[in-house]
Image (spheres, rainbow, N blue to C red):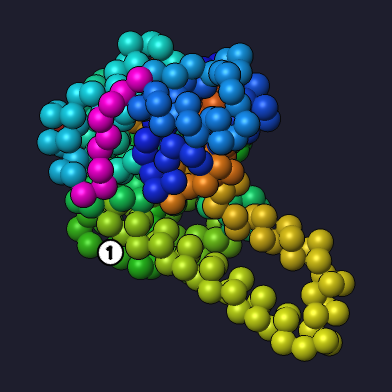
């Protein structure tokens, strides 16, 4: 399997990206294409003790970079020699199985849509991060790609998230829930009310379990949380902030004095496992669902471990062939113009 890496994307590029690429090659057995300024990439590899390219590692030269403050759409159209655009073109041409970038989210979304293109029939691509929770974890879709949505978008998000959870994450018959401010079908704005109606009318391919409130998403009540990108991003950031705060408070409480330090020592293995579960580097990236080939967005501050984790996500997505699943099931994700319900309903 060959993964394309935007070597100039992110705060720590290209050093962290190069190091993450080497770790991924060793741990996952994948081939890597590093896309970016060749001189900078070679210099980063030399700092890591690599005087020559290891087998399976390729460098694709791209002189320009897309900066975080660039207008996303204009940057994709005007900076055709940038590492992100060159990488996306290589993916579209079939030069790799998946792509990873820690660069601008907006530019990656625009570029993936314009260059790699959405699966035919999919209205909008969506970001779908996997978060830890009771029973293993859950997927949020969308978490920021689409601030404004229609009920049909949410219906398609539900199918995309369900197919990904089943194919890539190994969840049998994923439970899909709609993020809302109450369990009743009458709760929420007109968007949530109509989306609930469509999801309830979906066919047997979608295991819709109803609404889920924000305080329940981590309790193991569902495997896929469906929401618009605005609400999803708030949910994601709230969970990340709460987890960071709680872990920080636990550390402070367990290092106050000799007695608490002894307790921490006795619980060392359990605390290490808890920290591992909430370590974002382990997952590394967020899959962009709805694009015709796997595209993974890594965090802008990603270090080498996070890049390696993002490559792992890319390999999972490529192996699961989620775009293929979407193409096979696209008809059931459309609305009947006369009845106003899913065609499969």
Residue 100, image x and y in percent?
A: 43, 32
Q: Foreground: 109 or 165?
A: 109
In the picture, the quarter occupied by the N terminus is top right
Magenta stretch: give its range.
Answer: 61-69
Q: Nearer the viewer, residue 243 or 46?
A: 46
The foreground one among 281 and 56 is 56
Above or below residue 331? Residue 251 is below
Which residue is rendered at x = 81% and y = 61% of the image? 269
Let me know if residue 136 is in the magenta part.
no
Q: Quadrant of the C terminus?
A: top left
Badge 1 density bin: few <14, some 14–19, many ≥20, Cα 10 Å: some
Q: Is residue 51 left or right of residue 323?
A: right
Which image quarter: residue 294?
Answer: top left
Q: Position of residue 168 (x, y in %)?
A: 55, 31
Q: Is residue 68 magenta?
A: yes
Horizontal side, residue 2 vs residue 230: left or right: right
Above-or-below relation of 222 to 249: above
Question: Residue visible at 26% across and 47% down?
Answer: 68
């Amino acid at each position: 399997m060959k993964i394309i890496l935007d070597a100039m994307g992110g705060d720590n590029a290209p050093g962290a990206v190069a190091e993450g690429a080497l770790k991924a090659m060793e741990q996952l057995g994948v081939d890597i294409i590093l896309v970016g300024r060749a001189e900078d990439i070679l210099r980063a590899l030399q700092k890591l003790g690599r005087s020559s390219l290891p087998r399976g590692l390729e460098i694709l030269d791209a002189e320009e970079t897309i900066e975080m403050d660039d207008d996303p759409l204009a940057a994709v159209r005007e900076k055709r020699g940038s590492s992100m655009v060159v990488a996306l073109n290589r993916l579209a041409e079939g030069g790799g199985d998946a792509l990873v970038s820690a660069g601008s989210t907006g530019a990656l979304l625009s570029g993936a849509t314009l260059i790699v293109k959405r699966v035919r029939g999919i209205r909008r691509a969506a970001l779908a991060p996997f978060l830890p929770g009771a029973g293993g974890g859950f997927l949020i879709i969308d978490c920021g790609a689409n601030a404004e949505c229609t009920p049909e978008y949410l219906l398609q998000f539900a199918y995309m998230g369900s197919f990904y959870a089943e194919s890539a994450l190994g969840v049998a018959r994923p439970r899909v829930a709609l993020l809302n401010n109450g369990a009743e079908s009458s709760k929420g704005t007109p968007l949530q009310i109509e989306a609930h109606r469509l999801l309830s009318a979906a066919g047997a391919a979608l295991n819709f379990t109803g609404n889920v409130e924000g305080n329940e998403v981590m309790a193991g009540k569902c495997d896929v949380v469906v929401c618009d990108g605005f609400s999803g991003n708030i949910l994601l950031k709230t969970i990340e902030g709460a987890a960071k705060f709680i872990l920080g408070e636990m550390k402070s409480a367990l290092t106050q004095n000799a007695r608490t330090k002894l307790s921490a020592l006795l619980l060392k293995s359990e605390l290490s496992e808890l920290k591992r579960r909430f370590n974002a580097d382990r997952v590394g990236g967020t899959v962009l669902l709805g694009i015709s080939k796997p595209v993974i967005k890594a965090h802008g501050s990603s270090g080498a471990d996070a890049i390696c984790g993002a490559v792992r996500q890319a390999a999972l997505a490529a192996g699961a062939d989620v775009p293929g699943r979407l193409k096979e099931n696209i008809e059931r994700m459309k609305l009947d113009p006369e009845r106003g319900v899913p065609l499969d309903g």
